[in-house]
Amino acid sequence: MNAELKMEEGAPLAMEADRRRSKTMSRKEMARELRRQRLQGTMDPEDLDLLRELTSNRPKTRADCVNSPRPCVFVSCKYNLYLDVNPETGSIKLNFPDKELFDLEYTCALDVAEKGGITLEEVGEIMNLTRERIRQVETRGLEKVRTATEAEPKRPRG
């Protein structure tokens, strides 16, 4: 009887060994796999069609999108304020987790830049950050610009 019990217990295990288990992939793995497929030319034709359609409809210059309807629906654009996509890992960060895209006053950083000079408080409200954090980012950006211009070779005047 003990042997029969062991055989019955072992039967499901043998069946499970033949069955393929599902695999969970992180966004990073998926992005890496997509890049690999694109480089090797082995992408799924359906994915290629979708990628072509997205890139053909997406604005390529500011002139292409300046008169587009707002809110801007191209959330993967680097100027869109709704979310940030890391190009290396493919990870997504929602800048406004408690709001929908259509609830935002501004969805494009270029629209904010065209508005002209605004206060740290206004920038903080648009970017969903504190005034202090905006000041820190501004200081770091100015320092990077200063360092880059100092590193350039001096041009002779005259």
Image (tube, rainbow, N blue to C red):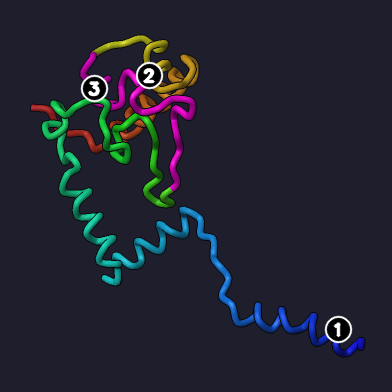
CA separation, marks 1 and 2?
Answer: 67 Å
Q: Quadrant of the image for the N terminus? A: bottom right
Looking at the image, is 88 positioned above or below residue 75? below
The residue to which callout 3 is attached is 111
Q: CA distance from mark 3 to mark 1?
A: 72 Å
Q: Secondary structure at mark 3?
A: helix
Q: Position of residue 104 (x, y in %)?
A: 35, 21
Q: Report the residue marked by disc 1.
A: 5
User: Where are the magenta residues, as a range?
Assistant: 91-115
Q: Nearer the viewer, mark 1 or mark 2?
A: 1
Mark positioned earlier in the residue sequence (3 or 1) = 1
- Answer with left or right where residue 58 lies relative to residue 30: left
Instruction: Say which of 126 and 46 sits in front.
Output: 46
- Residue 42 covered by magenta stretch: no
Q: Which mark is residue 126?
A: 2
Q: Residue at x 46, y 53 (%)?
A: 27
Q: Quick check: 74 above or below 99?
A: below
**Is the C terminus in the top left, top right, bottom left or bottom right quadrant?**
top left
Q: Quadrant of residue 92?
A: top left
Discs 3/1, front: 1
Q: Amino acid at mark 1?
A: Leu
Describe the element under mark 1 as helix, strand or loop: helix
State the residue lying farthest toward the right: 1
Sort mark 2 into few (<14), some (14-19) or many (20+) by Cα contacts within 10 Å. Answer: some
The image quadrant of residue 66 is top left
* Residue that appears at 17% across and 44% down: 57
Q: How many marks?
A: 3
Gap between marks 2 and 3 measured at Cα = 11 Å
Q: Secondary structure at mark 2?
A: helix
Classify mark 1: residues with Cα within 10 Å, few (<14), some (14-19) or many (20+).
few
Q: Is residue 74 left or right of residue 128?
A: left
